Image (cartoon, helix red, strand yellow):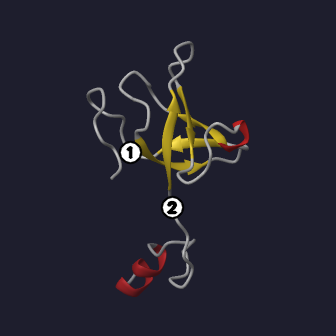
Amino acid sequence: MPKTDTNMAKHFTPKRTVPASSSVDPFTVLVVWAVPVKNPRILIAYLPGTDPSNPNNLVTVLVRDNRTFMLNTRLKATKTDRDKVYNLVGSIPKWRGQKICP
């Protein structure tokens, strides 16, 4: 029996949806505190408004390559399931010092 248009629409609806009333922030804005030389896949960052000299406020951001990041660069990141580890949202800067996040 061929499927009708109403049946097709039912199969293509997303299974998990976020209610419109919830205010879930998909990313967090972080500021780069250090760019490690030994490991080119991570950045050390902190949340704006916190004291970066306190090691408890620092987090690790996983990136593809950290060569084009500079100190005090703002970036968008999402939290992973690990403690104090974030993933970069978007692409890395094309040249050194390029702004990523306003």
In terms of image quadrants, where is residue 96?
top left
Cα–Cα gap, marks 2 and 1? 12 Å
Callout 2 secondary element: loop
| Relative vertical location of residue 19 with respect to residue 12 in this rendering, above or below | below
Q: Toward which corner of the image does residue 39 lie, by quadrant?
A: top right
Residue drawn at x 71%, y 36% as measured from the top left: 55
Quadrant location of the N terminus in the rendered image: bottom left
Report which residue position mark 1 lands on: 90
Query: Residue at 55% of width from left, 70% of height from top?
Result: 24
Residue furthest to the top in view is: 38
Left or right of 15: which side holds 58? right
- Using the rendered image of the protein, determine whether residue 1 is visible from the camera's viewpoint: no
Q: Is residue 1 above or below residue 61?
A: below
Q: Earlier in the sequence, mark 2 or mark 1?
A: 2
Q: Around disc 2, counting alpha carbons within 10 Å, would you say few (fewer than 14), some (14 to 19), or many (20 or more)?
A: few
| Mark seen at residue 41 | none
Residue plotted at (41% across, 80% down): 9
Picture coordinates of residue 68, whole percent (x, y): 35, 25
Please state which amino acid type lies under the numbered disc 1.
Gly
Q: Secondary structure at mark 1?
A: loop
x and y, in percent, of residue 45 in the image:
55, 38
Quarter residue 19 falls in:
bottom right
Q: Is residue 5 above or below residue 24?
A: below
Residue 74 appears at what percent x and percent y?
A: 41, 44
78 vs 96, nearest the viewer: 96
**Vertical placement of residue 29 versus 46, above or below:** below
Residue 26 disc label:
2
Residue in the picture at 64% in, 36% down: 53
Q: Amino acid at mark 2?
A: Pro
